Image: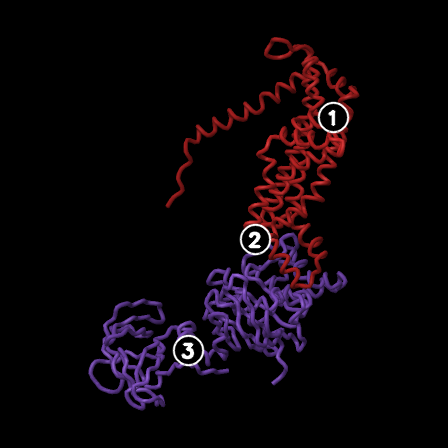
Amino acid sequence: MDRPAVALEGLSFSYPGGAAGVADVDLAIRAGEMLVCIGPSGCGKTTLLRLVAGFLKPHAGRVAIAGRDVTGADARSRQCGIVFQSYALFPHMSVRDNVAYPLRVRGVPASGRAARAAKMLDLVGLAALADRLPAALSGGQQQRVALARALVFEPAALLLDEPLSALDAATRVAMRDEIRRVQRERNIATLLITHDQDEALSLADRIAVMRDGRIVQVGTPQAIYDHPASGFVATFVGRANVIEATASGPDRVDTPLGTLATPPHGLALGAAMSILVRPERVEPAADGGGGDNLIEVAIEQDKFFGATRALVAKAGNGRLAIETASREAVRRVRIPRDAIQFLDGKRKET
Amino acid sequence: MTAAAPVGPRFTRWVTLLYLGYLAAPIVLLFVGSFGQLWLNTLLPTGFTGRWYAEVTADPSFRRAFASSLTVAGLTVLLCLVVGLPLAYAVFRADRPGVRALARVIYQLPVALPALVLAFGFIRVFSSDALPWLGSIWLLVAGHLVLGLPYFLQAVVADMQRLDLRLLETAAESLGASGWQRFFQIVLPSLRHSILAGLIVVAALSIGEFQFSNLVAGFLNRTYPVVLLQAFYGATGFACAATVVLLVLALAASVAGAVATGGAMRPAGAH
């Protein structure tokens, strides 16, 4: 594998109050890769970004950018393009001057600045608004300016701190694609921080899930979704039924829902475990007929989302979340054997 | 929910008009009086003359006081910029909220305190043999600085918070700007409206200040309001004309202040 664009080794930081630091983080962002760091608020993901940016100095560990150890270097010399949650555009400068600012402080002559700023504004589709002041732009447009400004000086890495959280839902989806397009076009190693799973799943080359200052799983969106390492990852990324189970045979478990046929779990009889079933893998079943894992359910909640319905049903002594496109009444469901996964919290995937 | 209709539109209009009349009456009367020949026990003066203005502008003590006032105001504004800007920045950037709150209480103190108290303190300290500076123009400037600084700090610190200046600086730093570049290219230009508005308030305060100046000013650097008091022992027309001069200055300051503040209140960064 190539040398990573950003490499974090054993990175630790704690705030004086003791809250929301990071502990022993190892993470590498490959050249041209979009790595999305996701976690609930207070999990330390913003701290992680600030450590990479150089706004915070780690208490232990190393930060390397483009192969250079920058652990002790200040933010100025790290050459990271950063897009802030509230954009942080300079209010007294035109869009063009904002984008050209990194070049101005680097002593690029005025003509060269203007040309490069114009090229970046072209890339983000804002060439026509170059003379406006930031206050005269919409949120999405300000976001594009911030993106152009963060990229114009050809930084070694791009850091995005919850870049879409201040936008309305419609703009957010459009900006998501825009960020992805620009990131691909510039082929720049990118760390994006978010708490939004849709954002993470749709944007990322790889996702790093954080909890309590630690990275609990790193993998492609599909790997994270299909093979979550723990109940936490399963419930945080996507909806999930995490069910307590006891082994009652080599491929059979007892659960509050009843006895389920599963893939072989390799655990001793009577061993406790957690199993995962994604709601969209639960299939409504017709009355009558037989087979494995058929469960009678009583619907308690039924939310209609157009394309799908999200149901919560009482099943046996437990509850089951179900997602289905069916418009029919649901009285009986089937959990396919291969829809059942085992969570042990120890598995690590890349 | 629909917006409630304003309470008694006619009532509020009348209150506003009455108040404006009340505010304008003395000013209008002073203006009228400054052109009147004789004004004794009548509602309005009799006759028309420009001689009172000629006398005021010819009076050496008024000329000196006028120059003195402008000098003191100019120096106060300059000092306010040099001292106030770093102070505002320090208050804004203080890490602990408790420190910020305490700083605010301390720098707002002169607003609540009568200028008289400050003057007594100055007289007590600066008439001693160790610091015999009573009567110097710098002492006057120092006093006006203390009286004006709260208003300057209030304007500038509020603007720093409104702009989220800390984040702008962080962004500039990440884009490669050095400390000096941040100060001259980001901090100063983005605060220019509130700095200007604050300084105009300080200048206006300095020009109109009486209590402190009356007690602390030396005979040769008495400011305009101090000398103005003497005018009321003479002809009414002369007193009116002398006051109108101060009024015009005050009016100019408040118009300039309103224009500058208008700039600061507009959405961040509008020209």
- The disc at residue A230 is 3
Tag 3: residue type?
Answer: Ser
- The disc at residue B222 is 1
Q: Is residue A308 above or below residue B128?
A: below
Colour mode of the rendering: by chain
Write down which chain is painted purple. Answer: A
- Crowdedness of circle 2 by 10 Å Cα count: few (<14), some, many (20+)? few
Chain for disc number 2: B
Q: Is residue A331 above or below residue B9?
A: below
User: Disc 1 and disc 2: Cα gap in Å?
Assistant: 43 Å
Q: Residue at x 68, y 23 (%)?
A: B244
Q: Are marks 2 and 3 on the same chain?
A: no
> Which of the 4 image quarters holds residue A300?
bottom left
Chain for disc number 1: B
| Residue A199 visible in the shown view | no
Q: Earlier in the sequence, mark 1 or mark 2?
A: 2
Left or right: residue B53 versus residue A262 is right
Can you name the residue that lies furthest to the front here?
B129
Tag 1: residue type?
Answer: Arg
